[in-house]
Structures are given as structure tokens and as C-alpha cells.
Amino acid sequence: MSVKAMYPGTFDPMTLGHKELASRAAKIFDSVVVAIAANPEKNPMFSLHERVSMAKDVLSDISNIEVAEYSGLTVDFAIENGIGVIVRGLRAASDFEYELQLANMNRYLAKKIETAFLTPTEYAFVTSSLVREIATMGGNVSSFVSPAVEKALVNHFKNK
């Protein structure tokens, strides 16, 4: 039986922590869709097109990962694409309560879809928000993002 998973998120921008979790998910599941949410309520720094493009660049070396965009409910995207598992990252204990609530709601909405939690190793302290904040102030983010994402951040602030 082939198991298809999705790793959803805004990925604004995609960090090396995101790549780590996507890479680990790709070792567990037959295929993984990194699903980038439009999520305009979060007022993302990068457009959906830019986030998808960066993710494709960052994850291009992992053969069983595809990158897709979506809007609406995550479980609806999963059902429409034959996905059986939603992968979520837990960086700290403080993430657990929210993620558990989300997983339970998803299970209520789509009983056949499971949630798998992965914990990061090296990048547990890295968030997209912190990367954006450091980049906003001209700090060096090269330890937290791929070269392509770093370039996109530099260009974004150069044009402001």
C-alpha cells in the first residue's frame, strides 16, 4: 500500500527546519506533497507564487516530494489529492496544545486522514517569523535558510 502524506504550511519563507521535516517525512512516506497555503489572513511577506518557487528550489533534491499550492481547508486538499496523512512539526512543548487541537479538528472533519507529528533536531528554535525579523533588521540568516531563500529575503528588503 502506497502512503501519500502532505506537509502543509504557509512557509513564509521556507527555513532549513522546514526542509529537515520535509526530508524526514519523505523517508517515512512513499510521497509527500509540501502544500503551501495561500492563507491571506496571515499577510505573508512573499506572494504565494514566490513561496512555491522558493520551496521548489529548496526541495528539488528530494525525488518523492512535490510542491503544490492550496487555499481552503487542509483536509479538503488532502481528500481531493488522495492524501492519507498530514505531517505537522512540533518544535517545543508549547506547540503541542495547538497542534493537538488542530489534529483533532482535522480528524473530526475527515476521519480517514491521520496526523503524524515530527520533531526537528538541529533547527528546533528556527521559525519563519524569527527569520523574517532578523532579515528585516539586516541580520545574517544564512544559517537558517537556503541560499535561494536568503537571496529572496535580501532582494525583498533591498526593494523596500
Image: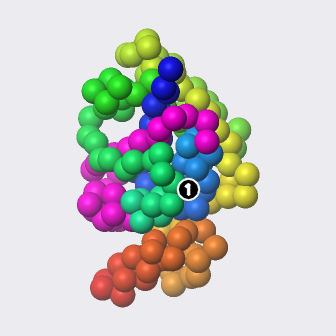
**Residue 89 horizontal/vertical position (percent):** 59, 42
Q: Quadrant of residue 56?
A: bottom left
**Residue 30 horizontal/vertical position (percent):** 51, 35
The kind of residue tagged 1 is: Lys
Residue 144 versus residue 1 in the image, above or below: below
Q: Image quadrant for the C terminus? A: bottom left
Q: Quadrant of residue 110?
A: top left
Residue bounds of the magenta highlight? 27-54
Of 74 and 60, nearer the camera is 60
Of 74 and 133, nearer the camera is 74
- In this rendering, would 149 be left or right of 48? right
Question: Measuring 28% from the left and 27% from the top, which residue is drawn there?
Answer: 80
- In this rendering, would 61 be left or right of 74? right
Residue 20 versus residue 58 in the image, above or below: above
Question: Measuring 57% from the left and 82% from the top, which residue is drawn there?
Answer: 139
Residue located beneath label 1 in the image:
19
Question: Measuring 53% from the left and 71% from the top, which residue is drawn there?
Answer: 146
**Element on which disc 1 rests:** helix
- In this rendering, would 122 be left or right of 76? right
**Residue 54 horizontal/vertical position (percent):** 39, 65
**Residue 47 horizontal/vertical position (percent):** 28, 62
Residue 60 versus residue 8 in the image, above or below: below
Q: Quadrant of residue 77?
A: top left
